[in-house]
Image: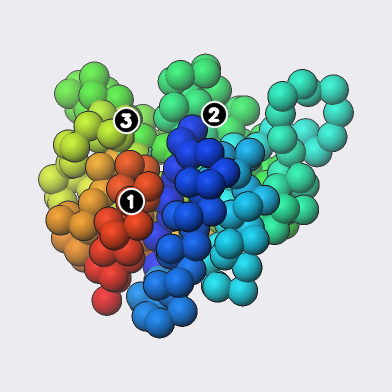
Amino acid sequence: MTRRLIAGNWKMNGLRGDGTQLAGDLADRLATEQPNCELLVCPPFTVMADVADAIDGSGIALGGQDCHQKMTGAFTGSVSAAMLADMGCRYVIVGHSERRHGLGETDATVLAKASAAQMAGLIPIVCVGETADQRDAGQALPVVTEQVLGSVPDAHGGLVVAYEPVWAIGTGRVPTMEDVAAVHAAIRKVLRDARPRGSDALILYGGSAKPENAAEILAVEEVGGLLVGGASLKPDQFWAIAASCD
Ligand code: PGA
């Protein structure tokens, strides 16, 4: 099995000193103990240069939380995949629900961003996931399937998909392990059937992952790692989650 990925999505948190401290703490721990996974941190853009310095040579990967779909141009306020690659990023999150639902990003936009990421040599982490209403209506699998078909590129290049039920993000609620298994199996099937070049992509779970539930979630078939929000801001918790990879 490919090495699992434990990714920290710091979201819009932390000033430069906080980011340096958090990243430095993780790098120090990694110098003496190696969890059985790849570690990734996705800080805000303003903190990225400091974090890059703090993790330099540690083996911790750096990632962006979003990128624009174009490489350069008149897009005030945006950051391109090429710029992230230039900063030393290996990954970029695209299509997070806080952008799909909060900022109106469509599958087509997410697809364009993921393609731009691959063209820049980055590995996009394409997020998909149903809302509470969609789950209650029994629509979780079709919704996620449609999102994968609409937002995962059909191209050579690194790829990670993250299943993040919208209702589980930052709420402390997690799906049953049967539901996680069902959605991950459905994503794998869509990739195999419709995205053969990405058929062996890691599929992460995200949404209220924490030390107490990490081992159980990681034991579910087809869960290739975790995308961690809140708990990634606390080094002890993020480390404990990473240590849950056996
Ligand atoms: P959470 O966030 O772990 O705080 O639920 C996950 C995410 O949004 O990626």
- Between the C-alphas of marks 1 and 2, the distance is 32 Å
- Between the C-alphas of marks 1 and 3, the distance is 22 Å
| Sequence-earlier tag: 1 or 3 | 3
Q: Residue at x 44, y 27 (%)?
A: 98
Say which of marks 3 and 2 sits in front. Answer: 3
Outermost residue toward the right?
73
Q: Which residue is mark 3?
A: 166
Q: Looking at the rendered structure, which numbered label has been put on residue 64?
A: none
The local crowd at label 2, few if under 14, some if 14 to 19, many if 20 or more residues have their Cα within 10 Å, is some
Give above or below for 24 relative to 205.
below
Q: Residue at x 77, y 47 (%)?
A: 82
Residue 110 falls in image quadrant: top right
Tell me if residue 201 can be seen: no
Say which of marks 1 and 2 sits in front. Answer: 1
**The residue tagged with tag 2: helix, strand or loop?**
helix
Q: Which one is nearer the viewer's eye here, 146 or 64?
A: 64
Q: Which residue is mark 1?
A: 234
Q: Residue at x 59, y 54 (%)?
A: 51
Q: Residue at x 25, y 42 (%)?
A: 208
Q: Which residue is mark 2?
A: 107
**The residue tagged with tag 1: helix, strand or loop?**
loop
Residue 236 falls in image quadrant: bottom left
Can you give x and y, in whole percent of width and height, for residue 157 in the image?
66, 58
Quadrant in which the C terminus appears: bottom left
Residues marked 1 and 3 touching at CB (< 8 Å): no
